[in-house]
Image: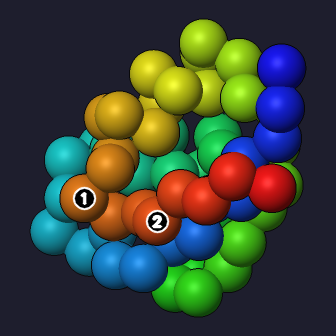
Amino acid sequence: MGKIKITQVKSTIDRPKDQKGTITALGLGKINKSVVVEATPQIHGMVNKVNHLVKVEEV
């Protein structure tokens, strides 16, 4: 498994509660904040749920 860099590019204002929770669980919460995490199936599922709010890059 590799690592991926997830960067939040849009706000969670006026988004459903589950999407806000997913952003928080990924360790994000502010625009342009980035985290590097292992590319597990669980992380990919979370990214798919909020793919319109984040940018993903391979590290």
Q: Residue at x 51, y 72 (%)?
A: 8
Horizontal relation, residue 51 to residue 23: left or right: left
User: Residue 12, position in %: x, y?
Assistant: 33, 69
Instruction: Judge by depth and name the residue closer to the eye, 14 or 59.
Output: 59
Residue 42's place in the image compared with 16, above or below, is: above
Residue farthest to the bottom, as pictured: 32
The amino acid marked with disc number 2 is Lys
Q: Residues within 10 Å of mark 2 (few under 14, many from 20)?
A: some
Residue 12's place in the image compared with 20, above or below, is: below
Horizontal relation, residue 1 to residue 10: left or right: right
Quadrant holding the N terminus: top right
Horizontal relation, residue 42 to residue 34: left or right: left
User: Residue 28, position in %: x, y?
Assistant: 64, 63
Asked which secondary structure carries label 2, the reply is: strand
Q: Residue at x 25, y 59 (%)?
A: 52
Real-space Cα distance between discs 2 and 1?
8 Å
Q: Residue at x 59, y 70 (%)?
A: 7
Quadrant holding the C terminus: bottom right
User: Residue 13, position in %: x, y?
Assistant: 26, 75
The amino acid marked with disc number 1 is His
User: Residue 14, position in %: x, y?
Assistant: 16, 68
Q: Are marks 2 and 1 in contact (CB under 8 Å)?
A: no
Residue 58's place in the image compared with 28, above or below, is: above
**Could you tell me if residue 18 is visible in this image?**
no
Which residue has dot 1 on it?
52
**Could you tell me if residue 50 is visible in this image?**
yes
The image shows a total of numbered marks equal to 2
Tag shown at residue 12: none
Q: Residue 2's quadrant in the figure?
A: top right
Horizontal relation, residue 53 to residue 33: left or right: left
